[in-house]
Image: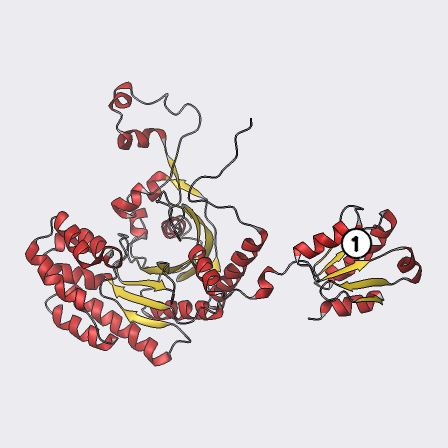
Amino acid sequence: MAQKPGIPKGTRDFSPEEVAKRNYIISVIRNQFELFGFRPIETPSFENSSTLMGKYGEEGDRLIFKILNSGDFLKKVDDKLYAEKDSVKLTGKISEKALRYDLTVPFARYVVQHQNEIDFPFKRYQIQPVWRADRPQKGRFREFYQCDADVVGSGSLWQEVEFVQLYDTVFTALGLRGVTIKMNNRKILSGIAEVIGAKDKLIDFTVALDKLDKIGEEGVKKEMQEKGIAPEAIAKVQPLFEFNGDTTEKLDRLATLLQTSEEGTKGVEELRFICGSITGTGLQSAILDMDVTLARGLNYYTGAIFEVSAPGVAMGSIGGGGRYDDLTGIFGLQGISGVGISFGLDRIYLVLEELGLFPETVTATSRVLFINFGEEEAFYSIKALQMLRKQGIKAELYPDNAKMKKQMQYADKRGIPFTVLVGEEEMQKEHYTLKNMQTGEQLAVSLDALIERLSGA
């Protein structure tokens, strides 16, 4: 008995309707990217392991899918090393490539390789799948799409202002009004770590703090303690868990807290500029919120950081990003500042689905099905189909000369609103019988009239 086929956990098949909805989201995002002046690039699905490893922190490295070398990949492995059964040491010998974890690091590699062909500042967008060996759960998959926009070659904070506006514009266009754009600055987090005496534990501090919404205040404190952060330092963090008020009030309190930290003070000044500019220009429907506990665990952020959440849906972030001044430096290109954001296509899909925000026209099928009564009738129909398609009307011919009932049922199941019947009489009179599948009404029409009626609502 043949084995029942399946797909790996954390991956999915997509039906025609689901693909149509995903393409709708992508088209809205792509359109806004281009309106903001971003240009498209694409990079390979897999990169050299050396390109990816060490760029995402310890947790991120564990989630990178490694690809086994081609051929007899164990042949060159030393017997002693093989006998140790140390997977970490062995991986480097049998795997030289890995599936990309995100689009930002491959973009940094692209910039370094193509620096002589790029005009800076370089604004690019990229919409491609990424892979993470994460535990699958609602809204979290092992294969998913990211939709990124980045600017490299400019340290101007106007880029951050435009990215907030880009988030606002995209989600407003998708009908997802009232998203919250949380913002913080890694300089502020570095300053906090400095003033509490835990500067050497910055990464552990930020990774733990970033989990506040998942494990709560006590969970964060416990993780910090387990990572070696002193109890007295943790006690000094307490005000962060009770940070409230409007953006101005929060920034004023931070300025006082960080007055002894040059880096922290600079982070506060950067946020003041960004938030002040957004307040001055306004947003269409999004809400900008300064969240001092927002850390985002990735190592490469150096300035502003963003995270977007949807209203009324427990889904986690549907977008995020930030500034990464030294990212290209890891590939040998110094002094190139960058900032970028990402849209989580799959989570956005789930949010729109749950809130019923997809337009009905997104999944529209063919507008008309020509019933097949035989070879001669089908040939007559094909000529009309060509004219309809030239007018942008989705039309198709049932491929088989099957019973009329079966063909009508097919149209009904597909949700096709009209059918066209062509028999001997229609061919003699050079017209077509158009049937409305909802009302049952039938009309004999010319080709011009057929095109006109199918072009209407």
Colour mapping? secondary structure
Residue that appears at 24% across and 76% down: 246
Residue 174 in the image, given as x and y percentages of width and height:
48, 67
Mark 1, Cα crowd under 10 Å, few <14 / some 14-19 / many 20+, is many
**Residue that protrudes farthest toward the left in the picture:** 232
Q: Amino acid at mark 1?
A: Ile
- Rendering quarter of residue 46: top left
Indicate left or right for 13 with 191 as reference.
right
Residue, disc 1: 371
Whether residue 191 appears in this view of the structure is yes
Where, by quadrant of the figure, is residue 351 drawn? bottom left
- Residue 407 is left or right of residue 48, and the answer is right
- Residue drawn at x 34%, y 76% is 278
Q: Residue at x 42, y 76 (%)?
A: 284
Circle 1 SS class = loop
Position above or below: 399 against 314: above
- The percent coordinates of residue 334 (x first, y second) are 29, 53
Q: Position of residue 165 (x, y in %)?
A: 40, 71
Q: Nearer the viewer, residue 167 or 359?
A: 359
User: How many marks do you count on the picture?
Assistant: 1
* Nearest to the observer: residue 349 or residue 293: 349
* Quadrant hosting residue 368: bottom right
Depth check, front residue: 71 or 393: 393
